[in-house]
Image (cartoon, helix red, strand yellow):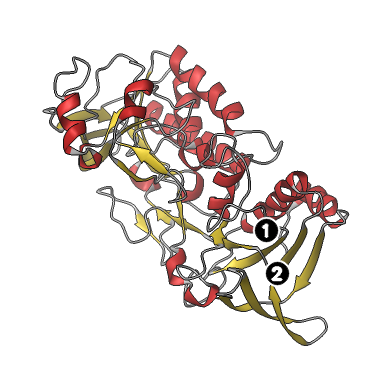
Amino acid sequence: MSNSILVVGGGFSGLTAAIEAAELGYDVYIVEKTPFLGGRVAQLNKYFPKLCPPSCGLEIQFQRIRKNPRIKFFTQAEVVGLTGQKGDYTVKVRISPRYTAPQNVDFGLLASTLEGEVCSEFEFGLGKRKALYRSMPFAFPGRYVLDPAALSKTDAVRLAGNQFINLNEQPRTIELGVGAIVVATGWKPYDVTNLTNLGAGSVKNCITNMQMERLASPCGPTGGHIVRPADGRAPKRVAFVQCAGSRDQNHLNFCSYICCMASLKQSLYVAEQYPDAEITIFYIDLRTPGRYMNVLEKVKASPNVRFIKGKVADVQDDPATGNPVLTVEDAVRGEKLTLAYDLVVLATGMQPTLSGETLPLPVSVDEDGFICGGEEAGIFAAGCARMPLDVMRSAQSGTAAALKAVQTVKGR
């Protein structure tokens, strides 16, 4: 039997679960498929409830991990196999090569001189990254990662003799003995290219809510300046389109919980940066539970922002101006409106990462991809792997999953 606990996913709920279990005296392994810990929170400009930058909460979590010898983490790693039973599992984990030395070598200068560039996944395609990179200034672990596929031939020759880079590094597989598992695989933005009627892919100045977070971030592709992707101009009129794909049987059949609050927060980003901007929020219903009513009241009091209850049916590109043109029904006045804006932000929904994917663990998922079973096997879901949640509730969910995992291994 094993008293160790495995946490699958290194986002906010996963980190919380790992830290809580470790601080209760249990050995914990974190397996994260990306090169860095932090998950979606790391991509935000600010997050609720305090509207602080992600470095605020994540740095605290990272420090707790650094100081706790009971926590071991593996990045660029995935669970590929599981044998055993509740209380006595053997987990097979495949770790992809990082190609850089274990030491936190500062490759900043070298990386900036490389020729090869690809679209940055972290920036949701709004910016480029080099083949040798860190996603953000406070990335943890602080080691750079190398993407060999992004190297030019010249780059490959330059790096060949570097003592801190090993282009011949191979994937490896390890086995971990654990008694319980926490699945905190998080969420992914709904594929916006499915929303063709809302301008996705055809209207250049139509972005997603997560792209807006990156534009507003000081460490984002524009240094925190909210500008139009097509021409870099400051937007004077901005529209937020709620429920972009959510509550729709053709896309996401559920409410994603956070979208309304995200748009309210982002309207404040725009108003703070451009005091004269005109902002419109098109909505079906507004969901701001509990303390978040204060945010709604603050936005409603802003002279910059107006609310129109009505579903946006269509977004087209005006070829003469590059402005997105919206067709929407004002449900209160019973009018069909055609309105032009400089920038449109689609409040795309939150989809579980496991949607359309398989995890080699004995858990069941519902029709939307959220985990709905597995506790009888000592496997507990946390955060947005269970249901749409904000950061605060994701952390609470992580704590709850950690306590269940601890009870499982302690009971054995």
- Measured as percent of width and height from the top left, residue 238 is found at 69, 61
Which amino acid is tagged 1? Cys
Q: Position of residue 342 (x, y in %)?
A: 66, 63
- Quadrant where the N terminus sits is top left
> Which kind of residue does numbered mark 2 sit on?
Tyr
SS at circle 1:
helix
Toward the viewer: 161 or 299?
Answer: 161
The circle on residue 112 is none
Is residue 412 shown to the viewer in this render?
no
Residue 255, quarter of the rendered image: bottom right
**Left or right: 114 as drawn, with respect to 192:** left
Label disc, if present, on residue 283 of the rendered structure: 2
Tag 1–tag 2 contact (CB < 8 Å): yes
Give the SS element for disc 2: strand
The circle drawn on residue 260 is: 1
- 151 sits to left or right of 355: left
- Give the residue at x 21% y 35%: 96
